[in-house]
Image (tube, rainbow, N blue to C red):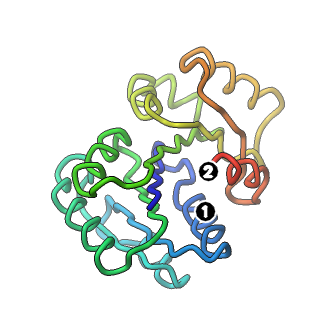
Amino acid sequence: MYVYILGGFLGSGKTTLLMKIASMYTKRGLKTALLVNESGEIGVDGATLKAEGYDAIELPDGCICCSLSGTLQSALKNIKRDIDPEIIIIEPTGLALPHKVKELVHYAMIDPDETFIIGIADIQRFEDLIKKKEQFFTMQMSNADFILINKLDIAKPGQIEAITTWIDDKFPGKPVQAISAKTGENMDKLYEMMQ
């Protein structure tokens, strides 16, 4: 069983990416379960995913790496028992620290084959995020197995290169790929990185 944790700040495109990845694995014939952590009162993401026909478990009202840690562990055990998927994709809130979620995955599951963190940088809000919340963003990306620069479809000239340089300086050697989860551009390169 492979577990993918999507890490990125609010509005970075995690849900759109989640649906693309889930669709890719489903087309490959792999049983895929989704675990979505909502921070608002209405679980739009969970409802949308269920409407699309995915096995989606929703954890509302709280952060799965903090107040809902026990709930996450319980949900993972139930997913393993009831669905027994080959792939689990976890979308925490934009305020979660993905490496904390990964620790909880390892506590809850007996030896998942592999657990990967996919970091997502939002091209549209990157500059503002770095100005206002650089330390938090750095913590979110620090344990990512690779970092995606999302929203390639709206990139301004030089933006991809500037963000890539910033990420390379901060996280030397970490793979970086620009994509558009919305249009599907470069998603094939992401799928290659994912096994």
Task: Tell me the residue at 29%/68% (across/down).
Answer: 41
In the image, residue 48 above or below residue 62:
below
In the image, residue 49 above or below residue 21:
below
Check disc 1 and report its element: helix, strand or loop: helix
Horizontally, is 49 left or right of 153 in the view?
left
Is the residue marked by circle 1 packed among few (<14), some (14-19), or many (20+) residues within 10 Å? Answer: many
Horizontally, is 11 left or right of 152 in the view?
left
Residue nearer the viewer, 83 or 137: 83
View extreme (top): residue? 169
**Number of numbered labels in the structure image:** 2
> In this rendering, which labeled residue sits more in front, label 2 or label 1?
2
Q: Quadrant of residue 108?
A: bottom left
Check disc 2 and report its element: helix, strand or loop: loop
Q: Which residue is mark 2?
A: 194
- The alpha-carbon separation of the residues under discs 2 and 1 comes to 10 Å
Sequence-earlier tag: 2 or 1: 1
Task: Tell me the residue at 27%/53% (across/down).
Answer: 64
In the image, residue 178 above or below residue 18:
above
In the image, residue 6 above or below residue 138:
below
Residue 67's x, y, as percent? 17, 51
Q: Amino acid at mark 2?
A: Met
Residue 13's x, y, as percent? 57, 53
Task: Tell me the residue at 68%/19% (across/down).
Answer: 165
Residue 15's x, y, as percent? 52, 61
Q: Amino acid at mark 1?
A: Ile
Is the residue marked by circle 2 packed among few (<14), some (14-19), or many (20+) residues within 10 Å? Answer: some
Task: Tell me the residue at 71%/50% (across/down).
Answer: 192
Residue 148's x, y, as percent? 62, 41
Q: Could you tell me if the residues under marks 2 and 1 are in contact, i.e. CB atoms within 8 Å?
A: yes
Q: Which residue is mark 1?
A: 21
Horizontally, is 157 left or right of 121 in the view?
right
